[in-house]
Image (tube, grey):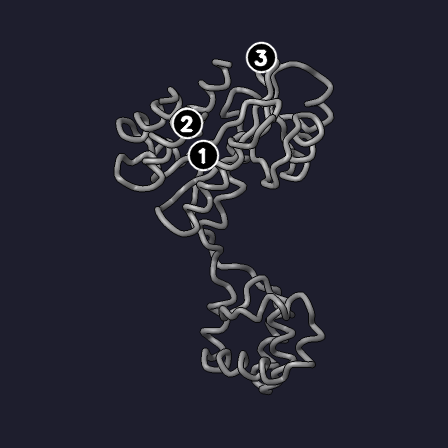
Amino acid sequence: MNKWIQQSIQYANQYSYLDDLFQVYPTIPEGIRDIDELKWKQVESAFKKKNNKALIESLLQLDLFPIKDSYIAYLRRDHKAIEHNPRTINRLCGRIYELGLSKLFERCTEPKETNRQIGPLFKEWIRSKALGITPVPLNKFISSSNDAILDASDTQMMDFAREELNYKHDKGLDFVARFNGKYVIGEAKFLTDFGGHQNAQFSDAISTIKTPRVKAIKIAILDGVLYIPSNNKMYKAITKTYSNENIMSALVLREFLYSI
């Protein structure tokens, strides 16, 4: 088995794994969302007047629509559809009126789901010099051959990897670095539970490290429940199917990089 998988499993099961992982993924629930006062007054006015078209239009201006419905995304992308589909608008508004204004405000100001906050946290941790190096922008990264970590958007990282490292996978990257003259690329995931979406996240990371003919060391920086010894699909995958791949916790990433 790859030593970094072994070290990650050991760390997760023998040390203060969750306490230490909180430095990487401080998933503190946010407070309520702020709503522009003028926008909320428009919602309130349309609600009280039972003006369905104006109510939907005003709610679509907010970051969070108060009800879940498969047709909301379409309406966000094509406002003309509000005019052309009165029965859909009436159906949606019926559900909204049932909430009442107080509950409607509560729904529209709900904090972001924790899982949706996780994405940027790994990069923020990298920027904190957790790996002993301050990440640098693309122009500085390419102008030197020294050890470096790239500080760039997902798109910039992917473009660099495609142009310079023959990376042809369609998934974005969370990590691009150069240590001892060798490039390292990878995805970072915090797998908070088993099943469904989390399995898909795991598969995304695996597909990145299985991308062929890349001129770089490919790694999957994975944390969470996958290191719990069990008959679960993820644990069996990292200890059997993908046991020779560079899969590791963010907490052993520094040691890995300086071992290259």
Q: Is 42 above or below relative to 246?
A: below
Quick check: 182 left or right of 113? Answer: right
Nearest to N terminus: mark 3 or mark 2: 3
Could you tell me which quadrant the N terminus lies in?
A: top left
Indicate the position of residue 148 as horizontal and vertical percent values.
Answer: 61, 20
Mark 3–mark 1 CB contact (< 8 Å): no
The answer, for residue 18, to whether it is visible in the render is no
Kind of residue at badge 3: Asn
Which residue corresponds to mark 2?
Answer: 251
Give the distance between the C-alpha atoms of the residues marked 3 and 2, in whole angstroms. Answer: 20 Å
Which residue corresponds to mark 3?
Answer: 180
Kind of residue at badge 2: Leu
Residue plotted at (34% across, 41% down):
233
Indicate the position of residue 69 as horizontal and vertical percent values.
Answer: 51, 70
Badge 1: few (under 14), some or many (20 or more) residues near its Cα, within 10 Å? many
Indicate the position of residue 242 as horizontal and vertical percent values.
Answer: 40, 30
Badge 3: few (under 14), some or many (20 or more) residues near its Cα, within 10 Å? few
Q: What element does badge 2 sit on? A: helix
Mark 1–mark 2 CB contact (< 8 Å): yes
Residue 247: quadrant of the picture: top left
Q: What element does badge 3 sit on? A: loop
Quick check: 25 left or right of 37? Answer: left
Residue 224: quadrant of the picture: top left
Identify which residue, 259 or 102, lies in the foreground: 259
